[in-house]
Amino acid sequence: MTVAVLWFRKSLRLHDNEALTWACSSDEVDSILPIYIFDEGEIDGGGEALGFNRIKFTEQALKDLDSGLRKELGICLKIFSGDYQEVLKKIVTGIGGERVCLAYEYCSEPRIRDAEDALKDWFGISESFRTISFPARHTLLDIEEVVGSKDYKKPNSMKDMERIFRRHFDVNSMGFYEVGDPLPVPNNSKPLTDAYSSVNCLEISDLERIIMETYPERSDNTQYFPGGETEALERLRNKVTDRRQFVNEFRKPNTISTNSEDDPREPSTTGLSAYLSSGCLSIRMLWRECESSYLSGSHTKPPESLHGQMMFREMFYLLSRSVENWDSDVGNDSCIEVAWDDFDREKIMAWETGSTGYPYIDAMMRQLDETGWMHHLGRHAVSCFLTRGQLWQNWTHGRDVFERKLVDSDWALNNGNWLWLAGVAPFSMPYYRIYNPCPDSKSSLNVETVNAEFIRYWVPELRSFPSKYIFEPHLAPISIQKSAGCMIGDDYPLPIVDRKQSRKENLIRFKASREK
DNA sequence: GGATCCGTTGTAGCT
DNA sequence: AAGCTACAACGGATC
C-alpha cells in the first residue's frame, strides 16, 4: 500500500493542480492524505503574526478546500501548525508500515525552495519513503527554466518580457501565447488514509477560535474578500468572463477612477489578486479567460491590458529568482543605496494608521487596514509618500506593513513593487516623478469627484468637507472647518510634513544618493 | 562609438 | 476645462 501525502502550499485549489491530479490518477497511489501546514508563529505569534485579513482569508480558503475535497473527491484536508519538518516527520513516521510518497508543490519563492532543500536530507529516514514534486504553477513561465537558460538576461521592461514570452511559448494563429490549458478538477476513487491519527491536527473551528482570540477587535468577522476557490471562481466569472467590454478595454492607469460599484470597498479592477497569491485561482485560467474575451473583438495590449499586468507579474517572479537579496536594501544589486532617515516611529505609525493629515493617503491606508486591499496606483501613492516623496523612510518598513496586511501579499511582487516605487531599482520609474498626495482636479490622475467620495467613506471625520478642501483640509478657512464639524488639528491631524517642501528636499537628497 | 530613444501609468502652473 | 510646457535629467538599448 502506498500513501500519497499531498502537501498543499501555493495552490489552495482543485482546478489546475498538478500534484492533486497525479495523486488521484497514479496507479502507484492507494490512498491519499491532503495536508496543509501553518508555519510556526503564523497563527499564534501574537502581534507579529499575519494580519487579520490575511489569516482569515487563509482560514476560509482552507475551509473551502476541505469542502471541495470532500464533495468532489471524497477525501478531506488535515491542517497542522508548527515547524514543517517536525510536522512532516511525525506524519510520515506515523503512517509507519506503509510506503509513503510525499507529493509537494514546487515554487521559486525562497521559503518554498528552502523547505525543498531541507527535504533532501530526509532520504535516509526510511526505505519506504520518497518524495515527488510538481510545479505549483503559480506563474505562467517556468521560472527555474527561464532563469536557468543560457541567454537569460534580467528583464527590465515589457519589451524584455515580450521577448521572453516569445522564446518560451508558441504563438497561436490568433497571435496569443500558448501558455497551456489549466487542468480540470480530477476524478478520484482513492480513500483518505486513516494512518495520520498519531499527530494532532487543527480543526477549522480551532483556527476560527485562534483568530478570534488574536484579533478580538475584529470579532464581527467583517471581511471584504472571502477566501477560497469557490469565491475565486465566482469572482472570475463576475469580473472577467461576464464582462467582455471591461476586459477588452482594460487600461490599468485609468482604472482608479472608474469604480462603477456603489461599495467603495469594491476594486475598480478585477479584485482577483488575493485569489492568485493564495493559489485559489490558477493564473493560466485567468490568462485564458482574458484571451477568450480578446477573441471577441478589439482589445488593449500590454503593458496596460490585463495580459500585460500578468506579464509584469511574471517579470517580478523572474527577478525575484535572479536578483540576490531581492527583499533587502543591502547586498541587492537591483537596489541603490539611499541615505534614508533612521526609523521614525512616529512617522511610520502615522502612515500605517492613516493619520498623516493627508486625507487621500490616510483613506487608502485605512482601506488597507480594513479590507486588506488597495488599488495599485494607491499603493504607488502611499509608498512614494513614505519613501522618496515625503517621509524619507526606508522602503523596507513599508514593505513589512504591506506584507502583514495585504490580503494579496506575495513575496516576489511586494518587494518588486517597493523597489520600483522607492525608485531604487534599475526598472524603477524615474526618481523625479513624485506622486502628489493631494490629487485634485489639476492632477493627471484627474479623479477629483471619485476621490472625494472615497475620502469621505474612509475618513468620515471629513465627511462634510467641501470637495474643494477635502484633499488639504488644513487649508480650509476656520469657518468652513466649523460648519463641516471637523477642526483640523483636533478632529483630524494637521499634515505630518509640508508636502511641497519635503518633496523638494527629498528630490535633492535622492539625487545625491544616486550620484554616490 | 556618439547620438538618440525609451521607460506600465508625474507635477505644477499657465492659458 | 483640457491641453500645453517646463521641470529634472537616469542609464541601458538601439541605431
Image (tube, coloured by chain):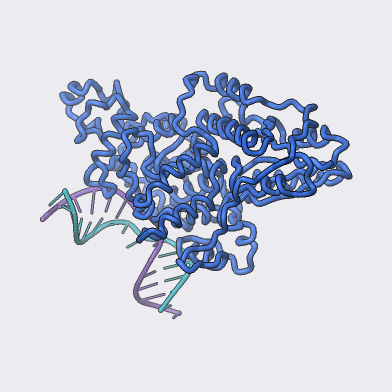
Chain colours: A blue, B purple, C cyan
In x, y percent, where is residue A504? 32, 47
- Relative image position of residue A427 (x, y in whole percent): 47, 57
Percent across and percent down for residue A434 are: 35, 48
At a point 51% along the width and 47% down the height, the residue shown is: A413
- Say whether residue A294 is left or right of residue A110: left
- Up the image or down, C7 lies above or below A421; here it is below
Residue A222 or residue C5, whichever sits in front:
A222
Asked if one can make out residue A108 in the rendered structure from this viewpoint, the answer is yes
Q: Is residue A19 left or right of residue A276?
A: right
A217 or A233: nearer the eye? A233
The x, y position of residue A332, in whole percent, is 57, 52
Residue A425 visible, this angle: no
**Number of marks:** 0
Q: Determine the image quadrant of residue A189.
A: top right
Q: Which one is nearer the viewer's eye here, A388 or A458? A: A458
Quick one: quadrant of the N terminus of chain A? top right
A381, above or below A294, in the image:
above
Q: Is residue A299 left or right of residue A33?
A: left
Residue at x 63% of width, y 51% of height: A108
Q: Residue at x 52, y 51 (%)?
A: A285
